[in-house]
Image (tube, rainbow, N blue to C red):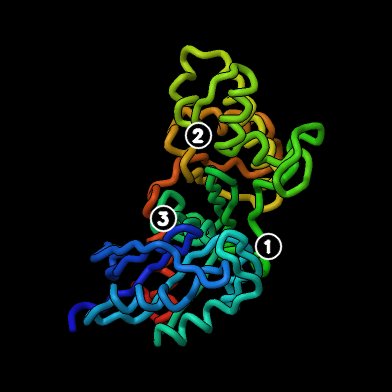
Amino acid sequence: MGERAVVAVDVGGTSVKAALVSPDLTPLRALRRPSSRVGGAVALGPIAELVRELAGDADVVGVGVAVPGIVDDATGVVRAAVNLGWTDLPLRDELAAACGLPLRVGHDVRTGGLAEFTVGAAAGARNALFVAIGTGIAAAVQVDGRLVAAGGYAGEIGHVVVDPAGDTCGCGTVGCLETLAAAPALARRYAALTGVERTAEEICALLPDDPAARRVWADMVEAMATALHTACTLFGPEAVVLGGGLSEAGAALTGPVAEALGRRLTFQRRPSVVRAALGQDAGRAGAALMAWDAAGISP
């Protein structure tokens, strides 16, 4: 037996990623497998097999699993994960029994937020907000050093209404933040203005020279600032950490959002607005932190 380790798992609709992680959160080995389905739902057996394969003869003491959807972190029940085909699945108990190891389950964005709050861009801040901006938008909220989960329903900042006269969101509500600020919204709105299809990344690259790119980017920034104003009023974060694919824009995102948010704030605490420090590693690090917690060990 070598040094103790944990397994961090990220379950997606098309693939399951897992890593063997050391106490300092360094990945020692990683594997990725297609998500196996039975009757339309992602099967748990192959996930347990992946954990066992990855663990090998290592001294694995716990498992942390990040999943999308409505996830009750406290009970480990996945209330709804449409892309995985799961409804009211007691994932923690079933997967822990299959793996034979202590196990924790968490929402994927809260898992990334846990990492950013613990060892990332908001380390040391007891009150912080992590917002993942990509295909969708969701947040992790930490208040007085505790993650707010509300049975899995907290953090859906992408569905805060920022434009009551705007487009209809996929959730059925009119004017959600996602209709203006998610990556597909940027691409859709740019195509409507120009007739040209561009990705959000390409639109960002065009900002210096393209008025249409600047317009959709500015609308995104204002929408983000409006939603963050609400979050700051409710939760009083010291730091707002922007992550997800759109955070790759760096200062082109954080600078304008900080400025637009600052214009809206009056009596509220004024948070720093920073780019996520861990990038694509946040989910793995957060799942590993959950795994160490499941084992009752502080890494």
The disc at residue 117 is: none
Q: Position of residue 2 (x, y in %)?
A: 18, 79
Q: Residue at x 43, y 23 (%)?
A: 205
The disc at residue 254 is: 2
Q: Position of residue 290 (x, y in %)?
A: 44, 71
Q: Residue at x 56, y 51 (%)?
A: 129
Left or right: where 73 falls relative to 116:
right
The disc at residue 153 is: 1
Secondary structure of the residue carrying numbered label 1? loop
Residue 49 in sight here: yes
Left or right: where 248 falls relative to 227:
left
* Depicted 264 relative to depicted 113: above or below: above
- Chain-order first, disc 2 or disc 3: 2
Secondary structure of the residue carrying numbered label 3? helix
Classed neighbour count for the residue bearing mark 2: other residues with Cα under 10 Å, few (<14), some (14–19), many (≥20):
many
Secondary structure of the residue carrying numbered label 2? helix
